[in-house]
Image (cartoon, helix red, strand yellow):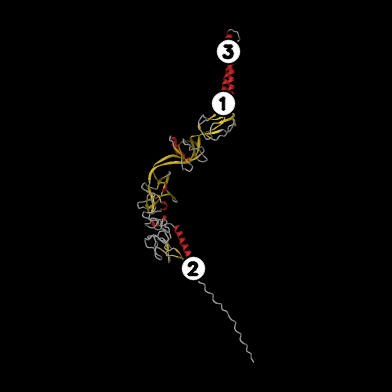
Amino acid sequence: MTTVKPTEPAPEVHIPQQLPVMPRKSKKRGLIWVIFLVAVVGVAGYAVWRAGQPVQREKGQGGRGGFGGGRRGGGIGPVPVVVTKVGRSSIPVYLTELGNVAAFYTVTVKSRVDGQLMKVDFNEGDLVKKDQTILEIDPRPYQAALDLANATLAHDQALLDNANLDLQRYKKLVETDAVPKQQLDTQVALVAQYEATIKQDRANIDNAKLQVVYANITAPITGIVGLRLVDPGNIVHAADANGMIVIAQVQPITVLFTIPEDNLPTVLEKLRAGKHLPADAYTRDNSKKLASGELVTLDNQIDNTTGTAKLKSVFENKDLTLFPQQFVNIRLLVDTLTNQLVVPNVAVQNGQQGNFVYVVDDDSRVHLKPVQVGATTDTSSQILSGLLDTDRVVIDGTDRLVEGAVVRVRKAGEMDNPPGYDPTAGGGRRGGRGKKGKGNPETAPPPPGQGIAPGQNISGAASGAEGGFQKAETGFQKGGGAFEKGEGHFRKSSGGFQKGPR
C-alpha cells in the first residue's frame, strides 16, 4: 500500500520591485550649463584673440575695424585730430651739462698772532664787507711790546743826541790839536751806531704796531661767512693748521662744468672771436631757471680720463639763488640756426622705424612719413629731411592713427566726437554695453535669428540685447539676442552663433 505524502507548499519568491527611474532633467540641465559656459569662454577668447590681430580698414571707414566705436574708430566715423602746418623758425643750439657752483673767491681766515680769542663780531651766515672787523684777539701783550719799543727808541734817541754834541766838540778841538784825530773818528763811528740803533728801534715799533693790528682780524674780501671753527676764549696760534672761519664770495659766483671734447672746437671758435656765450643755470630737474650769466674761460687742457674739457661761467647772483657746491644744469648757447624747418615736439613719434610724423593730405587721409630730427628746444624740433613747407602734421590724436586712416580735422580743445553725436543714445566712446533692455534704435542689434542688414552699425563689443539673463523658476535662462557682435563679426542669437555679413 502506497502512502502518499502531502505536497508541501512551494516557498514564496519575493521579486523586488523595480526602482523608480530618476529623472534625467538634472543631467540635461548640467549639460546645458557646461555648453553655455564653454560658449561664453569661446566668445571671450575670440574677442581677446581678435583684439590682438592687425587692424584692417575698409574703404571709407575712419577708424579701426573690430568691436565698434571708441578709440578703434568703429562707427563714429573719421578719427578727430588736431593738425598744424610745418613752419620755419630759428633754432638755438644748446649744450646742456651738469655743473658745480663754486665761490668766486674762498678765504680761510687764520690768526697771524698767538693769543686768546676775545670776541667774534659776526653772526654765522652773515654777509660781511671787506675790511670789516670780524674777530678780536687779546691785544694787550702786543700793546705792551709796542710801548717797550717806543721806550727803547726814546732811550737810544737820547744817546744819539749826546753823541752828536760830543762829535761837534771834537771837531773844534781837533782844529786846535787839543784832541787826537783818532778820538774824533771814534766819536763819528759812535754817532753812526746810535743812528742805526734808532732805525732798529723804529722797525721794532712798526712790528709791534703790526702785531696790534693783527690782533684785530678784518675780512679780507666781501662774502658770506660760514660756521665758526673756533669759539671765543680759546687760545689760537699762528701755526694752527685749521682756520677760524671761511669766507666765500658769492656775488659774483662761478659755475664749473665740462663738455665733451667733440664740442670744444665750436666753443673755442666763439671765444676766440670775442663772443660772449650766454649760459643759464637750472635746477637739477630742469624745472626752474635759477640765474643767467656768460662763459668766461676754459681750462688749458682736456682731461684724458674722461675726454672732457672744463669750462667756467660767471653769474652775478644778485638774488643769491646760487650757492657754493650746489649742483645745477648749465645750458650753454653755442649757436643759433636761422630759417629752419620746425614742427612741434608732440608731432614727432618714435617707433621701430625711427622718428616719424603723421601728415594729413588734401583728401583728409594720414600718411606716416619718417623724418630726421636735428636740434630740439622745449617746444619744437628741427626737421632735417622728410617734410616740406606745405605739409600738415598731426599734433593730437596720433595714438589712434595708422597709415591711410581717414581723419577729421578739429580745433584744439574740441570734443573728440563728431558734431551731432549723442553719447547718451547708446553705445559710447568705447562701444559700451548701453542701458539694460534699451539701446539706440540706429545701433540696436537685429532680432534673434536674423542677420545684420547691410549698412547697419552695431556699436560696442558684445552689446547686451533686450532680455539679457533673467531668473526663471527652473534656473537661469538666456534672453533673446544675448551677446551680439558688430558688423563683420560673430553675434549670439537665440538660435546660436551666426556670422554677420562683412
Which residue is identified by label 1? 212
The answer to which quarter of the image holds residue 119 is: top right
Q: Please, which residue is most extreme toward the right here?
A: 1
Q: Position of residue 448 (x, y in %)?
A: 41, 65
Q: Give the class, few, some or many, for how many residues have Cα within 10 Å of label 3's Cα (few <14, many ≥20).
A: few
Q: Given this view, does label 2 or label 3 mark the residue nearer the observer? A: 2
Identify the residue position indicated by label 3 in the image: 165
> Residue 203: where, in percent of width, then height?
57, 22
Residue placed furthest toward the front: 473
Q: Are marks 2 and 3 in contact (CB under 8 Å)?
A: no
Q: Is residue 105 above or below residue 31?
A: above
Q: Specify which label sits upstream in the sequence, 3 or 1.
A: 3
Q: Is 334 placed left or right of 112 in the picture? A: left
Label 3 or label 1, whichever lies nearer to me, is 1
Residue where numbered disc 2 is placed: 29
Name the element at disc 1: helix
Task: Locate the C terminus and report the quarter of the image it occupies.
Answer: bottom left
- Residue 66: x and y in percent read 42, 58
Q: CA distance from mark 1 to mark 2?
A: 113 Å
Q: Amino acid at mark 2?
A: Arg
